[in-house]
Amino acid sequence: MKTLFKAIVFDLDGVITKTAITHFNAWKQIFDEFLKNRADKGKVTFKEFTHADYLDFVDGKPRYEGVLSFLESRGINIPQGSKEDKPGKETVSGLGNQKNEVFLEILKKEGTEVYSGSKKLLLELKKTSVKTGVASSSKNCRTILETVGLLQFFDAIVDGVVSEETGLKGKPEPDIFVRACELMGSNPEESIVIEDAVSGVRAGARGKFGLTLGIARKNNMEDLRKNGADYVVYDLEEVNGVKGLNKLFLQFKKS
């Protein structure tokens, strides 16, 4: 089937794989432990880390930025530290490293699933000339894709490792999406971004992608619309495959 777009850049967590809940559980474990320790020392009154905190301050951001953003929301200031800090050290990097350790433990123990609508679309795209890429803040992107057997579906992967090595800014800046397009020989105007996070649709809009498609996994349809999504669905099954993407791309394509 002839397509009007050359490439699609997918987010990973919450778009392709059901790892968003795994991330939340890992963040909750380390933040609640951190906040309880500070409460025991009389520094703060304990208030648990909630799903709303995850969406507002952590979701879609690089790991250390997520730590900093959440702590700032609670008026907590700790040293940045370095990426070599031991997991659990009371620094931004130490907490971020602990989160990654916990996340990998949960992933190894429980595994993860792929959204059926996303896999169905990937299988259909494989039969077309459309290039597919993943742009994710996660440094575990390749590990997750290997775990679920989808690594071979993607022509470009721009993850947290690539961002750190090349100095790309995290979402809501469009850097990682634009870089994925470059690796696939495309440009934002002739490409689609598919995201479930507010920071991600902001990045798609800022990057002037031909279509920024939001997925309201968290019942956040209005937030996604307000922050840059051209069109929002609850699941990719609603799009009607490549044919449906063609129609949406034609409808919202930036002039």
Image: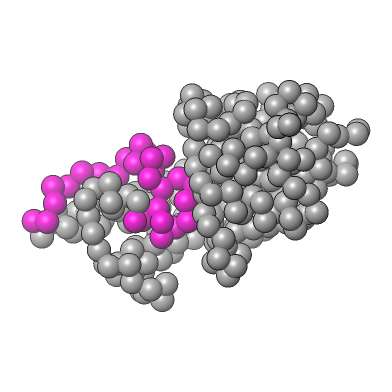
Q: Is residue 196 above or below residue 177?
A: above
Image quarter (top left, top right, bottom left or bottom right) of the C terminus: top right
Residue at image coords 28%, 51% = 72
Q: How is the image coloured?
A: one colour
64 sits left or right of 208 in the view: left
Q: Is residue 89 above or below residue 170?
A: below
Pick out the residue farthest to the right.
1
182 sits left or right of 64 in the view: right
Q: Position of residue 248 (x, y in %)?
A: 73, 25
Residue at image coords 13%, 47% = 45
Residue at image coords 71%, 44% = 188
Find residue 124 and report its image quarter: top right
Read off the magenta span: 42-68
- The answer to whether residue 53 is magenta is yes
Question: 111 and 176: which one is in front?
Answer: 176
Question: 14 and 107: which one is in front?
Answer: 14
Q: Position of residue 62 (x, y in %)?
A: 47, 56
Q: Is residue 108 above or below residue 219?
A: below
- The answer to whether residue 184 is magenta is no
